[in-house]
Image: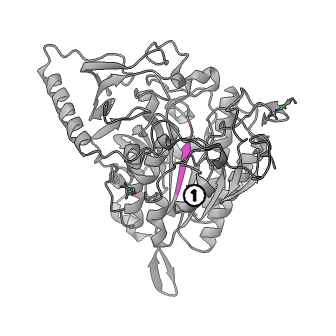
Amino acid sequence: MDYTCLFLFSVCLFGGCVASPPNFVLLFADDLGFGDLGCYGHPTSLTPNLDRLAAGGLRFTDFYATSPVCSPSRASLLTGRYQTRSGIYPGVLYPGSVGGLPLNETTIAEVLKPLGYATAAVGKWHLGFGANGMFLPTKQGFDQYLGIPYSHDMGPCWNLTCFPPDVKCFGLCDVGTVTVPLMHNEVIKQQPVNFLDLERAYSDFATNFITTSAKKKQPFFLYYPSHHTHYPQYAGPRAAGQSLRGPFGDALFEFDNTIGNLLTTLEETGVINNTLVFFTSDNGPELMRMSRGGNAGPLKCGKGTTYEGGMREPAIAYWPGTIRPGVTHEMASTLDILPTIASLAGAKLPQVMLDGVDMTQILVSQGMSKRETMMFYPTDPSEMYGLFALRLGKYKAHFYTRGATHSGTTPDHDCPVFAVLKSHDPPLLFNLESDPSENYPLPLIGRPDLQDVLDTIKKVKEQFEATMVFGESQISKGTDPNLEPCCNPQCSPKPSCCQC
Ligand SMILES: *[C@@H]1O[C@H](CO)[C@@H](O)[C@H](O)[C@H]1NC(C)=O
Ligand SMILES: *[C@@H]1O[C@H](CO)[C@@H](O)[C@H](O)[C@H]1NC(C)=O
Ligand SMILES: *[C@@H]1O[C@H](CO)[C@@H](O)[C@H](O)[C@H]1NC(C)=O
């Protein structure tokens, strides 16, 4: 497929043609690891629609999120900038967080709005709620929103039903806060949310959005950050009990069903050949959930760590007629999605320091990546420690390593929280092409070639860190229980009275 074909999409009416910019559907899984999809080798996952995307699209082997936890990863996805710039660190935002993704950050939705795109977000936001919902998606370029504005375990869940007919959610989730709300735009529709009906509501909302936009011949951007497969897993009647993999497998299958519904709608409305569907995940698997958590496949450790398992993710780009089916080993990142979408739509890039690069060439002509490096910040980035690791080409150097609570329970002693912060001088160096599992640090003695690699990595790190300006930490602004979303704001006693 020739690159110029991209510019041939057009709508011709009464002898005149107007360019029809492509639509974008961005699918984002939650705590889903590198080894969790059928098309990435998982033996018991049931992901027929994701497998269909992979078979008909481009599957990435070296695709990275920017953080091993949720909020920072999402900030980077939507802004094309490392989370340190926007201040979405350390850790994640909470229901009562004072801060959120600063409104002067430019999201993908805001990049597309000036071109007349219809924009919608459905699912897990997790970039802030704030006073009077000031950080909701509708304040960041999305025309419409349906979803839970943060993780669905950020409220007590032990009395909630996660599987039919009335199987209670596994564990307690977060006690002492309001139960999780379902919001439509800026209004709470339900509190607590009904997990058995949630995916159907999301699917209907998303397919209606596609149908309405397609009918109006309006280009659209649909952002669907799913709650699946984050703890506690849930699934409605269509997916429960369907996979061989238990609760995690059923949750994943439910997300996969929705992806199937979206594809069918794109086909039926006739826009499938003018739509880029992109799928990836926010961070690695939460190994501490054991068989109820995700799987990093051959990669080391998972959520919360800067090993590959924490940040390398499954990723698939699908666009029939434009993206040739295949597998790419080019390095790419969630950072690159904003510049790529901007380029494909012909939109202006925001006038800020971007960390993403345009990956159009990888998508449409299986070309080389413009990305040479990937930076690994821990969950609590600081100017004092800087990067924990840096990948340059096929080599990755770890300057610091540390385990994480989220990565507990596997036999690897480097993964759990007991593996305290360790500084490495010289850094641990791995060849990720021959050793993607980061099992065998390369010996430097008698290897001037590897010493050169390390020197180059150190230089690149210094240059990058010299230009990194940390934004004011939004998460350090703390929490205020009065800011937690409550459907009955005047009620008492809080938080338990917030039920509608
Ligand atoms: C947003 O505003 C803050 C506070 O004025 C400023 O420090 C930051 O650089 C701005 N960010 C962008 C992307 O303009
Ligand atoms: C949960 O259910 C138990 C038993 O029905 C009840 O005693 C308790 O008050 C409930 N807790 C909440 C937070 O609803
Ligand atoms: C998309 O393109 C394929 C191949 O050219 C064609 O068979 C199919 O009908 C097209 N679908 C739509 C909905 O236009």
Q: Quadrant of residue 294?
A: top right
What residue would you read off at disc 1? 134
**Residue found 28% across the figure and 39% down from its top:** 373
Q: Quadrant of ligand 1?
A: bottom left
Which residue is depicted at the point 32% across and 16% down?
440
Residue drawn at 46 percent across, 69 percent down: 21
Query: Residue 119 appears at what percent x and percent y?
Result: 56, 63
Out of 73 and 4, give the one closest to the viewer: 73
Q: In front here: 96 or 228?
A: 96
Taking the image as shown, residue 191 lies to the left or right of residue 95, namely right
- State the image coordinates of residue 384 (x, y, percent, origin top left): 30, 32
Q: Residues within 10 Å of mark 1 (few under 14, many from 20)?
A: some
Quadrant of the image occupied by residue 208: bottom right
- Work out whether residue 34 can be spotted: yes
- Please state the extent of the stretch shown in magenta in the rendering: 25-30
Q: Is residue 84 above or below residue 250?
A: below
Disc 1 residue type?
A: Met
